[in-house]
Image (cartoon, rainbow, N blue to C red):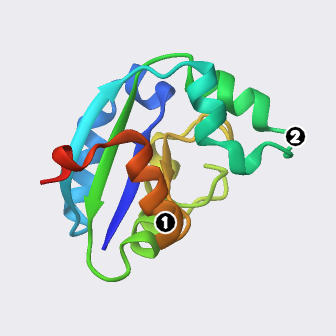
Amino acid sequence: MLTLSIIKPGAVARNNIGKINAMIESAGFKIIAQKMIAITKTAAEKFYEIHKNMPFYGDLCSYMSSGKIVVQVLEGGSDAVLKYREIMGATDPLKAADGTIRKLYGVSIDDNAVHGSDSDENAANEIAFFFSGLELL
């Protein structure tokens, strides 16, 4: 199974891409597609549309469009989504378990280093949002 990972603008700006990728690969994932992009606020709003009624939606979309991001497709076995969520850690880096990506590279709930899909269905939709089929061969 596949899951989507996004290294967020703050972690990209702090030069943590390689360190995060090393953690991903050490956890048994294969990065089968990866690109650095900048998305518009409109694109971020579409991507995070599932959260449009949440109080953090506007700030999240502004943050995600504030700088470069790295979008990735991870291959990690039948439980890829759950496995990646475990190595990401809790949304709040202060509450994340030691050794997780967010504990090591996140600085706040908003700037928490990475995004990961929360279900197999959302993973498929999120991957299709950023990658064409040709990029996943």
Q: What residue type is labelled 2?
A: Pro
Picture residue at 21% right of the left edge, 69% below the top: 28
Residue picked out by circle 2: 55
Picture residue at 50% right of the left edge, 59% below the top: 117
Indicate left or right for 31 with 1 as reference.
left
Indicate left or right for 58 with 123 as reference.
right
Q: What element carries label 1?
A: helix
How far apart marks 2 and 1 lie (CA) works out to: 23 Å
Query: Quarter holding the C terminus?
Result: bottom left
Mark 2, mark 1: which one is toward the viewer?
Answer: 2
Q: Is mark 2 on a helix, strand or loop?
A: loop
Q: Nearer the viewer, residue 116 or 90?
A: 116
> Is 133 above or below relative to 64?
below
Query: Quarter holding the N terminus?
Result: bottom left
Q: Position of residue 58 (x, y in %)?
A: 78, 29
Q: Position of residue 11 (x, y in %)?
A: 44, 31
Residue picked out by circle 1: 85
